[in-house]
Image (spheres, rainbow, N blue to C red):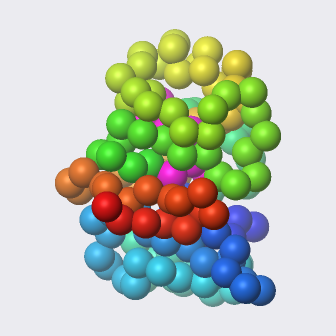
Amino acid sequence: YSAACPFGWWEQQVGDEIQCTAPFGYTTCSSVQSLSSKTPEQKQHWESLCQQRFPCRSRATCAKAWDVPCPADWYTVNGGRTCLAPRRYAGACSRVVHGLDALSMEEKRKFASKCSVEWPCDGEANVLDAGVDTGMPSADGQLQSH
């Protein structure tokens, strides 16, 4: 529970805190949360109550969820057709990537190696069966709807 936000949520700095914004279609709890100051026990309770998961501590040896459209810690938009890197991403690839959802498992493995990213562990991601997300972050990292 060391991550500031649940898996697949958009993380952004707002003043002195980290704000987490839910993927499009999430309605169980509030779609904007500040969870970074919560204890692991509080995050575990929130996770159970709000039916979301925090990222795994280590993805080095787990079985990967190759059916998930985007790398771990990336934000999924446009119904899974576009992946947005977290602010801290420092890999060799673009921070906005289109079409990863159409790649095979082997193609995703190659992308992960080339771009220094990991795919989530099996059971880590909650894939929402929602409509097309039109929210996109602006240049300053704020999530915008168009």
Q: Which of 20 and 93 is in front in this view?
A: 93
- Name the side, left or right, on which 60 lies relative to 26: right
Q: Is residue 89 magenta?
A: no
Residue shown at the point (42%, 39%) measured from the top left: 82
Q: Give the range drawn in magenta.
A: 65-75
Residue 78 position within the rendered picture, expressed as x and y whole percent measured from the top left: 33, 46
Residue 146 in which image quadrant: bottom left
Residue 40 position within the rendered picture, expressed as x and y whole percent measured from the top left: 70, 78
Q: Main secondary structure of the magenta part?
A: loop
Residue shown at the point (75%, 67%) measured from the top left: 2
Residue 17 versus residue 5 in the image, above or below:
below
Quarter that holds the N terminus = bottom right
Residue 103 versus residue 70 in the image, above or below:
above
Q: Does the magenta stretch include residue 72?
A: yes
Residue 73 position within the rendered picture, expressed as x and y whole percent measured from the top left: 61, 50
- Name the side, left or right, on which 21 lies relative to 126: right
Residue 4 versus residue 91 in the image, above or below:
below
- Name the side, left or right, on which 58 lies relative to 65: right
Residue 61 visible? The answer is: no
Residue 12 visible? The answer is: yes
Residue shown at the point (73%, 85%) measured from the top left: 15
Q: Kindly give the residue lying farthest to the left in the view shown.
A: 131
State how many labels appear.
0
Residue shown at the point (38%, 60%) measured from the top left: 135
Q: Which of 57 and 9 is in front in this view?
A: 9
